Image (tube, grey):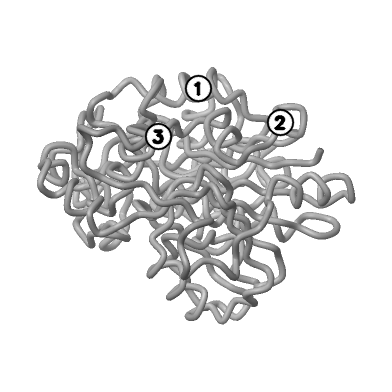
Amino acid sequence: MPVSIVVGGQFGSEGKGKVALEIARRAKGPVTVIRVGGPNSGHTGYDRSGKKWALRQMPASCIDKNVDVVFPAGSYIDVELLLSEIEELQYPKERVFVSPYARIILPEHKNWEREAGLTGSIGSTGSGVGGAVMASVAREAANFPLPSPDAAHFAPLQEFVADVATLLRNQLNMGFRIVIEGTQGFGLSLLDGGYWPKATSRCTTAAGVLAEAGLSPRDVDDVTMVIRSFPIRVAGESGQLTNETTWEKIAAKTGKNDIREYTTVTKKLRRVGHFDSMLVRKSIDVNLPNRVVLNHLDYIGESSDIGRSESQVRRFILGIEASISRKADWLGFSPFDVIERQECLA
């Protein structure tokens, strides 16, 4: 101990990057952040100067540039993207560590996804993660056409390759807080999300991302599940979205201006729905979080309205909590931070 895991409870874009950054900032002592999965989703955070960072390979929890960043064996790395984000962030390279077993995403993997029709049939971003996962599982099978190089044998990453298993164990022994920044959401999980084949190529639960990070369940003392007021799915044929509606109808009902959202990777208008308590309850059962964060409450009202017993946002929060049989611990009214529920909602 101590290890924090941050996962999404719906279909992604719940605000995991912001929450992982919040946990890193609140930690007492040194912190290391881990980014599992690949660049098929973007994570957004705001640094202390207020600058917005939308990152696909580097974790959003690193934007203060005061933590070690680890890409474990369960990472899928678009090397050109990683190097460009390190450069853009001006991140200290000596603080970035890549497992020799992390897999490399090649142009062939992206081409395979496009030629397979996945960008249309399941709403895939075409970032090559699925192709890279397939290549890794194929294990150089003669009848599968894609290679699967690892970081240890990929020259552009040599300065970052390290024994991250030993590094993380030593840091845990010294009392570091390790923050694992999960990607996407429970409804997209390959194994237990319930929406296969309209799913991602990995298991996105707390157990799944912990395995990708290469750490023991006995290390974990903190699991945070992030949900949002109105769940989204990516554009196109991305799968069922219970109680689907439109951004215009939500804006009209809540009295807000244009709140339309676009995907970080493909820049397409996201689909949106009303809150699905059944999906979130399933996610709670599987992830068993000790902290639930409810984000995007600014779509309904202001934090200053919580104290008013008949305010729309207060009724919304209490209604969601009743429907999932669980109180939210942190509430998000902006992309910058969260507030403690117990301090503002008696």
Identify the residue under disc 2. Answer: 216
Identify the residue under disc 1. Answer: 324
**Amino acid marked by disc 2:** Ser
**Amino acid marked by disc 1:** Ile
Instruction: Report the front residue among 40 and 222.
Output: 40
Query: What residue do we see at 45% from left, 67% from top?
Result: 82
Q: Between marks 1 and 3, how big is the CA–CA gap?
A: 25 Å
* Residue 293 x, y percent position in the rendering: 57, 41
Query: What residue do we see at 53% from left, 56% from top?
Result: 152
296 displayed left or right of 26: left
Dot 3: within a 10 Å radius of its alpha carbon, few (fewer than 14), some, or many (20 or more) residues?
many
**Amino acid marked by disc 3:** Arg
Mark closer to the chain start, 1 or 2: 2
Query: What residue do we see at 65% from left, 55% from top?
Result: 33
126 displayed left or right of 24: left
* Residue 117 x, y percent position in the rendering: 10, 42
* Residue 47 x, y percent position in the rendering: 59, 73
Local SS, label 2: loop
Local SS, label 3: loop
Residue 266 in the image: above or below residue 179:
below
Query: What residue do we see at 50% from left, 49% from top?
Result: 102
Local SS, label 1: helix
Mark closer to the chain start, 2 or 3: 3
Q: Between marks 1 and 2, how big is the CA–CA gap?
A: 29 Å
Identify the residue under disc 3. Answer: 202
